[in-house]
Image (tube, helix red, strand yellow):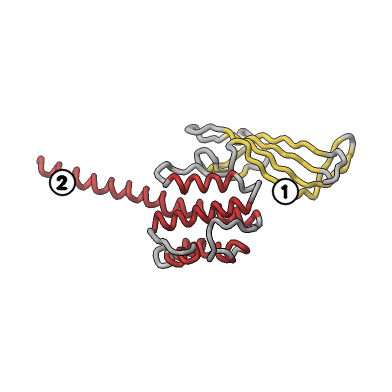
Amino acid sequence: MEPFKWQCPHCNHHTTITSTNYAESTFGLTIENADGSKVLSSYYIVCPNSECNKYTLGSVLFDSVYEGRNGQWRHYDQKEIKHLRIVPNSFAKVFPDYIPKPIIQDYEEACSIIDQSPKASATLSRRCLQGMIRDFWKVKSSSLFKEIEGVKEKVDILTWKSIDATRKIGNIGAHMEKDINLIIDVEPKEAHALIRLIEILIKDWYISRHEREIMFNEIVNTGEEKTIAKKKN
């Protein structure tokens, strides 16, 4: 197998996976049926980070065309139908516990149901986005659309572009003026785009602020220690 870059869903460690950490099994679903031939491919990845070392297990269902040769089945023209994460049971990343619990709950639930119901996932993501804007920036208005406008001058240009992009995504953008709890039809890729936005904003807002506070406190403490040491001398 060719090595590939990967981020562990348990510890968020970025790494490169090789054959020593990866196993795969493919099963051909070739019995004639109304939906045609399928391929089920299962994968097993063990995180090489010694502080984690947990495994990830999942399956991908493909729509394929099959032909038999020499007693073996060969598939081609694969098209992914569904990607199911078994362990852990969703695609949610693990975030620190200092991030507000309601935000994490909405994010994790949005991730857990994205394959079963993209529109329900998108609804939770919109609520999560609104929760972050209200909590982190203290901006509250009559609609998510207006709240997004309210942070335009508070965030950097790249962050704003990523937030503003949601208003250009199909039905999501068309319904920004309405209640965030309104269930709207969305494409799976639109729901995934919202999930990615939430992950970016959690990192850029909450995690970056926390890390900055730690560094500043270390600087302050170092300065105080030097002052105390000078007084003793």
Q: Residue at x 54, y 63 (%)?
A: 178
Task: Give the residue number, with chain letter if any, for mark 1.
Answer: 80
In the rendered image, the quadrant that contains the N terminus is top right
Residue 205 x/y as whole percent: 42, 54
Left or right relative to 137: residue 62: right
**Residue named by callout 2:** 227
Across and down, in percent, residue 65 comes to 83, 47
At a point 57% along the width and 42% down the height, the residue shown is 16
Identity, as a three-letter code, of the amino acid under mark 1: Glu
In the rendered image, residue 230, in percent from the top left (x then y), is placed at 12, 44
The answer to whether 95 is drawn above or below residue 131 in the figure is above
- Disc 1 secondary structure class: strand
Residue 176 occupies quadrant: bottom right
Q: Is residue 207 above or below residue 22?
A: below
- Circle 1 packing at 10 Å, graded few (<14), some (14-19), many (20+), is few
| Label 2: element kind | helix
Q: CA distance from mark 2 to mark 1?
A: 63 Å
Q: Nearer the viewer, residue 122 or 156?
A: 122
Q: Quadrant of the C terminus?
A: top left
Q: Return the disc, 2 or 1, that comes first in the chain's sequence.
A: 1
Q: Which mark is residue 159?
A: none
Q: Residue at x 46, y 47 (%)?
A: 102
